Image: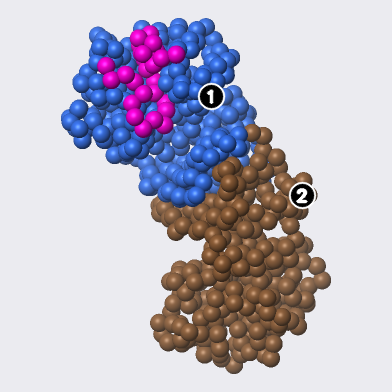
Chain colours: A brown, B blue
Amino acid sequence: MLYLGEQHIRESISLDEVMDTIEKSFQVYESGDFQMPDRMHVEREEGTILYMPSFTKDVFGTKIISTFPENIKKGVPTVQATMVLNKASTGEPIAIFDGAALTAYRTGAVGGVGVRYTTRENCESVGLIGTGVQGFHQLLFACTARKIKNIYIFDRSKERLISFKEKLEKRIKNVKVNIVDKVEELVLNSEIIITATPAESPVLPDNEEMLKGKHIIAIGSYKLKMRELPKALYTLLDDVYIDTKFAAEESGDIIVPVREKWIKEDQIKIFGELLGAKKPINEKGGTSLYKSVGMGLFDLMVAEAIYNKAIKLQKGQKIQD
Amino acid sequence: MLYLGEQHIRESISLDEVMDTIEKSFQVYESGDFQMPDRMHVEREEGTILYMPSFTKDVFGTKIISTFPENIKKGVPTVQATMVLNKASTGEPIAIFDGAALTAYRTGAVGGVGVRYTTRENCESVGLIGTGVQGFHQLLFACTARKIKNIYIFDRSKERLISFKEKLEKRIKNVKVNIVDKVEELVLNSEIIITATPAESPVLPDNEEMLKGKHIIAIGSYKLKMRELPKALYTLLDDVYIDTKFAAEESGDIIVPVREKWIKEDQIKIFGELLGAKKPINEKGGTSLYKSVGMGLFDLMVAEAIYNKAIKLQKGQKIQD
């Protein structure tokens, strides 16, 4: 059995390979050749624990993920996660993952695949609102999918911005990282805008003129009461691309606009339809929205791909049985 | 984070300490100071995968356990399991266990605690029907709870008996291991009789005279259609001790006798009531039955105890994060 932490994952697989794996996951998702039982929730005083099992013909896996908001006060990351990967034929466990690192990689790559297919190929600027672990990985993958020259970052916490910029500059080369004071400045300068916050009201200006022609990648909201996007955005859109049908069932950024009739239901398209297209949508300058909430199948297939590469490259920590 | 495999578990904790932990678990179970959500089942072509989460005020844990019957043909153990142990306050994972080894220890200890409280103190002989991993550990703990001089073993597979005897003799010292050809021979010679089979019809003779005065520890049946015990046994019993209320809801060895009126419902007692008693029941020679099906809380509390001892004794494999 192998243990695969953040460093092992990074040594084993390239960002492009993770995005290719996500594309493959979308194909498996479309084919229906998988099993993904309902997530199991446990509510505790400290927060929520989520069990996410999923199965393909080759492997199965379970992500155990807890979100305890009070951890911040203790200097401990809010999200803690472990993923166990098993052989589908015998049930044997073959790898244990740092589930937080795995989640960051797969969520970043799901966003990155959105960038691949819903943003103009010549985009050179990306803005990020929400400078947490997820936001960091969104930028990593966005900068792999497009030749980005300028990154703009915004967060309500100024202290976080400075350390975030330093971390980014260490990891992404040949890109200028710009801290902005106002969201409006970020929107004006960014062709691609990524929102990665737990916000319960819009973090972008409710202004059609400002949002016109922008490519939005929204990953923050995964509950009804969570919303990152303003009404003005929806009036600019032809279609809304969601990663899975769960986005339309769970996210306030889809449920509310449908309920309020800012968009019609038939404007909501499953992203998998775009795969294999030779050109991204909106090459001529339209506004786009890609909304992702993720699913266990992404974790499973990314975990499998990392495991296979780690075996091949002899990475990871061997666990003695 | 620590990895704790079979060898690490054995080095970290004594069999008596595991049994003491099970006694503590019964107290927590009685107090209600825990959370144990319904197990989640996933049915696959190859077999069943079971998710067993449980929570106390200090820790939570999840056992992922698969039972794939066809594994035998591939030379792979049927039961595969992994346990993840987390801090309750922050959700941080603190240890990963070989779940099969952990299950064997906790199940052995649950049986062993039954031996402590439902068998005469001067018992010197124990018989085992069903020579699998569970049976092996039942004997380890029975021989710790009582000063056993003779072990009698029976299995339908003769080959298994020989290797099982060798394995036992390596692990348990100063005890004679006797292979018997017939169950009747085992019953005649054994004061304590442990059944650890997946049988769907009784494995003991349906004969009151033979069973009178025997102490039965039954751990095989955990489903309605599984049954190890004959009608004759029940007519000899004053009370039936079950480890948890789940035994009366899940095991054919309790459900069928109640339905067929071989015992009355008010004869079924929760084992926890006996804890702290100075003398075992049946010191004067009565027949007894202790029926165990187990629960996630046992796994959790045994895992916690092993983890604490492993930290203290610096055992286990350190996982680099």
Q: Is residue A145 left or right of residue A134?
A: right
Q: Determine which quarter of the picture holds residue A122.
A: bottom right
Q: Is residue A291 magenta?
A: no
According to the picture, the residue beneath numbered tag 1 turns out to be B13
Q: Which stretch appears magenta?
A: B181-207
Q: Amino acid at mark 2?
A: Lys
Q: Amino acid at mark 1?
A: Ile
Q: Is residue A36 visible?
A: yes
Q: Secondary structure at mark 1?
A: loop
Name the chain under label 1. B
Closer mark to the observer between disc 2 and disc 1: 2
Q: Residues within 10 Å of mark 2 (few under 14, many from 20)?
A: few
Estimate the spatial distance between the alpha carbons at disc 2 and disc 1, rounded to whole Å: 37 Å
Q: Residue furthest right?
A: A174
Q: Nearer the viewer, residue A77 or B48?
A: B48
According to the picture, the residue beneath numbered tag 2 turns out to be A312
Q: Nearer the viewer, residue A143 or A309?
A: A309
Q: Is residue B200 magenta?
A: yes
Name the chain under label 2. A
Q: Determine which quarter of the picture holds residue B27.
A: top left
Q: Residue furthest bottom?
A: A209
Q: Residue A2 placed where, x, y %?
A: 67, 43
Q: Nearer the viewer, residue A72 or A106?
A: A106
